[in-house]
Image (cartoon, rainbow, N blue to C red):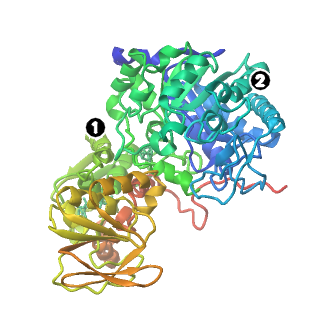
Amino acid sequence: MRNPAYDILFQPMQIGPLTAKNRFYQVPHCNGGGYRDPTAVAAMRGIKAEGGWGVIFTEQTEMHHTSEITPFIEQRLWDDADIPALRRMSEAMKTRGALAGIQLAYSGINGPNLYTKEVPLAPTALPIRTFTNDPVQARALDKTDIRDLRRWFVNAAKRSKLAGFDLICLYGAHGFGIFQHFLSRATNQRTDEYGGSLENRSRFVNEVIADMRDAVGDTMGITLRVSLDEHIGTLGFSNAELRDFIEMNADLPDLWDLAHGTWEDCSGPSRFKDEAAQETLVTGIRELSSKPVVGVGRFTSPDVMARLVRQGVLDFIGCARPSIADPFLPKKIEEGRIEDIRECIGCNICITGDMTMSISRCTQNPTFMEEWRKGWHPEKMNPKGESSNVLVVGSGPAGLEAARALSLRGYDVALAEAGTALGGRVARERLLPGLSAWGRVVDYRQYQLSQRANVETYFDSRLSAADVLEFGFENICLATGSHWRADGVARQHVTAVSADPAMPVYTPDDIMAGKRPTGEVVLFDDDHYYMGGVIAELLAKEGCKVTLITPCAYVSDWTRNTLEQGAIHRRLVDAGVTIRLNTGLASVAAEGVETVDVYTDARARLGCDAVVMVTSRVSDNALYRDLMARRDDWADAGIRSVKVIGDAAAPAPIAWATYAGHRYARELDMPDIGDALPFRREVTALA
Ligand code: ADP
Ligand code: SF4
């Protein structure tokens, strides 16, 4: 069973009038579903309860209609009508003895109120600070507004209690909650008793917590989520000032919830931030107060968790992403199943669900947000159907996840891989700068497969249609992946770019295979996710003089959704890469390229020794096409089904591939649902 070194993580701990059963604390996290998908979110939180978390929180909950963050989809507690959906969530959280928490947010200077059309209110009249620079400003709260806002917090607290929650987290971190807006001199430039000195800037949070204690404090715990450091120079709420604040207000909340300055800082991807990246900012804070402290740091190692509690740095291990990648993390530690932990890879794909207002995915846990929509459980598969075996061709993320999940269902699985290692694209990409943690996609599955008697892996096995027809498997799952194209086709060009064959052209596959340009390199990025930036960084560090051109206004544009675009741009500048935005590729000549300004069509020559095309990929689906062409031979070969999945069906990020593999495994031998919707959804009832 459990390693005694981890016992400390299972000691109960008090939060105000309540006791958490252990130290595993799921801090609030978005999921892209929010108020639009209440039952899907409730079921997701319920899975965390099953997985053993001691404290489970909602995502941020807009506590009054005068402050909302449309288009982002979080929770709402605007009036009593929102209580039933939230009660469904608290009930799911409490099924196994976890404390259920709600995070109340008044977004102040972050709330553009695009939906409610109310005038935003903030400590000081300034432009609204959002990802989208909405052209809206806030009005400064006057004394009457502050009294109203205090009452709205009390109303929200009472409603939270009616909705069944045990804990309330007041949001004042990541730049997102009104408490931080009052605490920081950047957003609080008042000259009355709410501004100026730290004592004055602390007045509002003191008043709100006192009001709330009177209203619900006998039965509910009140926690405060504050920024560890805004990192914006002397005007901001710094780590030193935070320590002064906590010393001055030592008994203010029932628990200090400490999170980094901006969301980008706090949820730093593994490319830029290690596990426990906030340790120095948080160390020593616990001694300033008698109240427990929770902190985050993409914790996946129980050794690191136990050390932080043992050393008195933290009382609770706060997790958002690690709890998404593996909702059963506490249970696996408790049962001594450390090897079974599905570690977060720090890719921030989960966050893109929120940023794109879709619904979240997780690269490691394809069941995330599908617990209710599809009835998928992260640890249990549906029973086996009527056939008995599957040949999975290709061991990239799609094939690996299909093989893992199929074997759990009870199928005999043969996994054939053309190469000599498992992992497909991940085996190659994990060697690129900053992407080593992504290898966990392979490591987790490789270990799981090694524990299953019903999976056989075959290397050096590039299969042809004739091979597949000869083998006699009932089901064929083709996960043969894709390769990068060299002809420049993507978004700017839908047909091949005119290119002089005298100019050497490389693709990311060439670079990953060890081929290298030298001298001056033009990298054309019309893919816009991480690959262009990663290859530019690699080549620049190896001594090439790299110019990255992209038709977009941002380098690695889509990574704005993974919260790393700023860090990528900074890193490329540091590495000496020249960045040319809003610049397309017109043609490739023998001595260089011709560029084109996307707005003016102005052309320019840019000399170089080599070109790297990071544009788009082509599916490696020849085997699939050959098998489809020989459909008439299937019956004799004993084949019941042939399906193509993952990048071989249509190239996409790794998370799409693990999802495709999981879905294949779930749906094999399932009844045909015809034209029906393949997932459940909630449709708003008409008023
Ligand atoms: P995905 O992201 O969809 O999982 P990858 O490109 O990561 O796809 O992985 C595809 C894997 O399939 C690669 O490791 C490749 O070597 C393997 N593969 C491709 N074609 C064949 C084939 N005909 N037989 C066996 N393995 C193949
Ligand atoms: Fe971690 Fe990536 Fe999953 Fe998010 S999507 S929880 S960062 S593995």
Measured as percent of width and height from the top left, residue 283 is found at: 42, 22
From the viewer's side, name the closer residue of 76 and 399.
Answer: 76
Q: Residue furthest front?
A: 191
Left or right: residue 299 compared with residue 395: right
Measured as percent of width and height from the top left, residue 130 is found at: 60, 53
Mark 1 neighbour class, 10 Å CA radius: few under 14, some 14 to 19, many 20 or more: few
Q: Give the mark toward the camera: 1 or 2.
A: 2
Q: Is residue 495 above or below residue 306?
A: below
| Quarter of the picture holding the N terminus | top left
Identify residue type, mark 2: Asp
The picture quadrant where one finds residue 358 is bottom right
Residue at 65% in and 30% down? 201
Mark 2 neighbour class, 10 Å CA radius: few under 14, some 14 to 19, many 20 or more: some
Residue at 81% in and 43% down? 81
The picture quadrant where one finds residue 420 is bottom left
Judging from the image, what secondary structure is the residue with disc 2 in?
helix
From the viewer's side, name the closer residue of 388 and 668.
Answer: 668
Q: Can residue 433 be spotted in the picture?
A: yes
Q: Disc 1 marks which residue?
A: 451
Q: Disc 2 marks which residue?
A: 211
Residue at 46% in and 21% down? 314
Q: Is residue 430 above or below residue 18?
A: below
Identify residue type, mark 1: Gln
Left or right: residue 402 compared with residue 245: left
